Image (cartoon, rainbow, N blue to C red):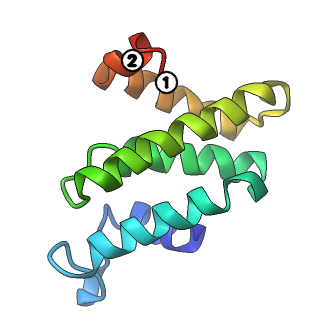
Amino acid sequence: AFGRLRVLQRHGGHVDGGAVSQEGKLPRLVAALLRSLLVLERRLSLSDAAKAAHFCALCAMDSPLLTEAERAEAKDGLARLLERLSWEQKRWSLEDRKLLTEVATLLRSEYPELLRSGW
């Protein structure tokens, strides 16, 4: 699943050469990646869980490529990932801390209602 995520992140959401296009495969790829991450969430290492939370926050929660239901799934998945990560905060690596700081900044600036709602 993270191989797909790295490709999407490296190419800004698209792969050159037409392998993935916004009109075609990208929405399905993002949705499939999201579901894979959420199904595997309990088996992810801390670093992979931090990357998954970062993906949910940056790529999935506000993506016009996903349906409302898929965005809701990203929001719920992000909540579960952040809850798990919060219990293991002492074991975060420097990279984990950086990713989760970006997630926190995004949530505070773009989704303050989530933080106020007891989400």
Q: Which of the numbered marks, if any, corresponds to residue 58?
A: none
Please name the amino acid that badge 1 sits on: Ala
Choose between 96 and 119: the one closer to the eye.
119
Image quarter of the N terminus: bottom right
Q: Dot 1: what SS? A: helix
| Residue that appears at 58% across and 56% down | 38
Query: Relative to 53, is 108 above or below?
Result: above
Write down the residue under mark 1.
Answer: 104
- Between 52 and 113, the one lying in front of the other is 113
Tell me if mark 1 has few (under 14), some (14-19) or many (20+) residues whose alpha carbon lies within 10 angstroms of its own: some
Q: Position of residue 79 (x, y in %)?
A: 54, 34
For the residue labelled by badge 2, is the local secondary structure a helix, a strand or a loop?
helix
The x and y percentages for residue 61 are 34, 44
**x, y percent for residue 7:** 45, 71
- The correct choice, above or below, for 50 with respect to 110 in the image is below
Instruction: Check disc 2: other Cα within 10 Å, few if <14, some if 14-19, many if 20+.
Output: some
Apparent side of residue 85 relative to residue 30 in the rendered image (left or right): right
Question: Residue shown at 32%/24% (left/top)?
Answer: 111
Q: Amino acid at mark 2?
A: Arg
Q: Are marks 2 and 1 in contact (CB under 8 Å)?
A: yes
Any part of residue 15 in sight: yes
**In the depicted view, which residue is nearer to us: 60 or 15?**
60
Residue 99 visible in image: no
The residues bearing labels 2 and 1 have C-alpha atoms spaced at a distance of 6 Å
Judge from the rendering whether residue 30 lies leftward or rightward of residue 37; answer left or right: left
Name the residue tied to disc 2.
Answer: 108
Residue for point 42% across, 48% down: 74
Measuring 28% from the left and 70% from the top, which residue is drawn there? 27
